[in-house]
Image (cartoon, rainbow, N blue to C red):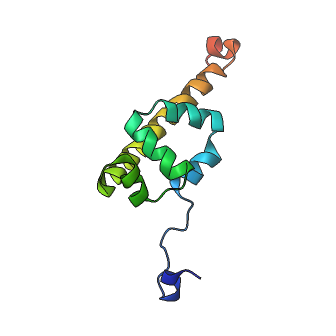
Amino acid sequence: MDAMAENGFEPVDNSPPPEAALLDCESTGDISRAIDQLPADMRTVVILYALEKQRYEDIAQITGVSVGTVKSRLNRARLKLSAILANQREQNEKSSVLPSERRTGK
């Protein structure tokens, strides 16, 4: 049992972390393409945190920046990934509309 749970502290939000929700919603290919579009500093942090399961402290040591900078980069990367994936979804939806539907407006 978790130490916090033993002391009567339960998390308010039991939803999966953003990375898990992201993986549920998007194909692996879409996610890989989106990660590739991130600036190198954000991409490194995302890969170390989400894929290699590194702790903030370890990422800070690996990248040579502070823990606060790691958290900031991760947050900015999440926002940027959300925007990139939303744009990809929009493009996919537009490209999946049949030519006859475009002409008739359906």
Residue 16 coordinates in the image, percent (x, y): 57, 60
Q: Residue at x 56, y 30 (%)?
A: 33
Query: For the N terminus, which image quadrant?
Result: bottom right
Q: Residue at x 50, y 68 (%)?
A: 13
Query: For the C terminus, which image quadrant?
Result: top right
Q: Determine whether 97 is above or below 86 in the image.
A: above
- Corner quadrant of residue 39: top left
Q: How many marks?
A: 0
Q: Residue at x 46, y 59 (%)?
A: 55
Residue 70 coordinates in the image, percent (x, y): 36, 51
Q: Determine whether 8 is above or below 48 in the image.
A: below
Is any atom of residue 106 visible in this view?
no
Question: Considering depth in this image, is 62 or 50 the residue closer to the camera?
Answer: 62
Q: Residue furthest bottom?
A: 7
Residue 89 coordinates in the image, percent (x, y): 57, 31
Is any atom of residue 59 visible in this view?
yes
Question: Considering depth in this image, is 93 or 54 the residue closer to the camera?
Answer: 54
Q: Residue at x 41, y 34 (%)?
A: 40
Q: Determine whether 29 is above or below 99 in the image.
A: below
Q: Left of 34 or right of it: where is 39?
A: left
Residue 93 coordinates in the image, percent (x, y): 61, 27
